[in-house]
Amino acid sequence: MQQQKLVKIVVYHAGQCDPKKCTALKLKRHGLIQLVHQIKHLPRKAVVLNPYSKKAFSPADKERIAKFGLAALDFSWEHAEKPLLKIVRGTSRCLPYLIAGNPVNFGCPTKLSTAEALAAALYIGGYRHEALKLLSIFKWGHTFIELNKERLESYAEATNSSQVVEMQKRWIKTA
């Protein structure tokens, strides 16, 4: 039986958060991601999760993730906007409307931790097992999935970014 190839996950770490609460550092300690300290070291053609991207992440990004990897940008929310509005190498995508399950931003729409953002992209992109594995190292990891199960499932059914945006509009109306 052939072993499934793992998704390459790289996180740019800006070093702006409390190391005790940083989900990216914990993912690195568990060997689940690669950490880089300069944006230029992100994989060239990877899908980069960027909350300021004009295009929504969708299952259509699965093939690019399989070939080139998934990348996240780990900034403190207070300091994120200015550097994230600059051009970031890779293919930037923003995640659709989801609710944070982490203790720092619990219940806040769109204020996801790096681990939640990566898990959401993996889940929507058809890598559910990998998403659950990332979240399994956090006591609150299951909470993120429980809060967003229906949203994640619906986004995962979309075929492209436009459909995800339409679904997102419906979720925001019911929030």
Image (cartoon, grey):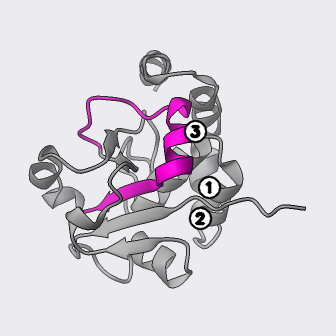
**Which residue is found at the position 54% from the left and 53% from the top?**
119
Amino acid at dot 3: Ile
Q: Which mark is residue 131?
A: 1
Is 33 positioned to the left or the right of 54 in the image? right
Q: CA distance from mark 2 to mark 3?
A: 14 Å
- Give the residue number, with chain letter if any, for mark 2: 134
Considering every residue shown, the one lying at the far left of the view is 82
Q: Is residue 159 above or below residue 67?
A: above
Q: CA distance from mark 2 to mark 1?
A: 5 Å
Q: Are marks 2 and 1 in contact (CB under 8 Å)?
A: yes
For label 3, the SS is: helix
- Give the residue number, with chain letter if any, for mark 3: 124
For label 1, the SS is: helix
**Which residue is found at the position 29% from the left and 78% from the top?**
18
Considering every residue shown, the one lying at the far right of the view is 1
Is 48 positioned to the left or the right of 62 in the image? left
Q: Is residue 90 above or below residue 156?
A: below
Q: Position of residue 98 (x, y in %)?
A: 46, 39
**Which residue is found at the position 37% from the left and 65% from the top?**
11
Q: Position of residue 33 (x, y in %)?
A: 49, 71
Q: Position of residue 128 (x, y in %)?
A: 68, 49
Towards the viewer: 54 or 153: 54
Closer to the chain start, of discs 1 and 3, is 3
Q: Is residue 56 visible?
A: yes
**Which residue is found at the position 37% from the left and 43% from the top?**
110
* Magenta range: 51-75
Q: CA distance from mark 1 to mark 3?
A: 9 Å
Q: Tell me the quarter of the image containing the N terminus.
A: bottom right
Is 137 positioned to the left or the right of 97 in the image? right
